[in-house]
Amino acid sequence: MMPKITLKAARVNAGMTQEDVAREMHRTKQTIVNWEAGVTAIRPNDLQALSDLYAMPIEYINIPKLKRKRRRTAFWEEEEGE
């Protein structure tokens, strides 16, 4: 079994920049950055398109877990542990 690699590694192995991928997929560079960083979810059809673009089976690409944005505590709410 081949070890999984990150989206960024798959892109770099394909010899592409984030700008190249954005142009090919008709997305913004920021979208590609967000996918690679786990900021936004990747739709299944976009994941398949990335797999095709990188010539890498989806099974070998490690999809980053979404990073949760920490909600700021409002001044009237208690901080955790208080």
Image (cartoon, helix red, strand yellow):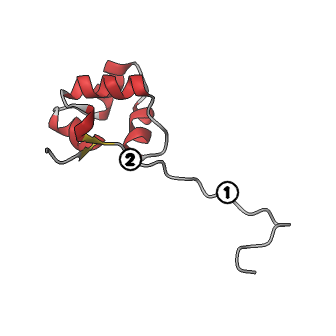
Check disc 1: other Cα within 10 Å, few if <14, some if 14-19, many if 20+: few
Counting the numbered discs, the total is 2
Q: What residue sits right under mark 2 in the picture? A: 64
Residue 39 position within the rendered picture, expressed as x and y whole percent measured from the top left: 48, 45
Q: Secondary structure at mark 1?
A: loop
How far is mark 1 from mark 2, CA to CA? 21 Å
Q: Residue at x 44, y 35 (%)?
A: 30
Residue found at the far bottom of this picture:
82
Q: What number is the disc on residue 4?
A: none
Q: Amino acid at mark 2?
A: Pro
Q: 10 Å neighbourhood of mark 2: few (<14), some, or many (≥20)?
A: some
Percent position (x, y) of residue 34?
Answer: 44, 41
Q: Extreme right residue here?
A: 76
Tell which tag, 1 or 2, sits nearer the viewer. Answer: 2
Label 2, secondary structure: give it: loop
Pointers 1 and 2 in contact (C-beta within 8 Å): no
Residue under pointer 1: 71
Q: Is tag 1's residue or tag 2's residue first in the polypeptide sequence?
A: 2
| Image coords of residue 22 (percent x, y) | 36, 26
Left/right placement of residue 59 relative to residue 71 reads left
Hey, which quadrant is residue 46 in on the image?
top left
In the rendered image, the quadrant that contains the N terminus is top left
Viewer-proximal residue among 3 and 54: 3
Q: Residue at 17% of width from left, 32% of height from top? A: 14
Task: Write the residue at 48% across / 48% down.
Answer: 66
Residues 48 and 21: in front is: 48
Report the side of 57 relative to 63 (left or right): left
In the image, residue 17 sits, relative to residue 53, either above or below, namely below
In this rendering, is residue 59 above or below 68? above
Name the amino acid, label 1.
Arg
Tell me the residue at 18%/27% (across/down): 55
5 up-or-down from 71: above or below: above
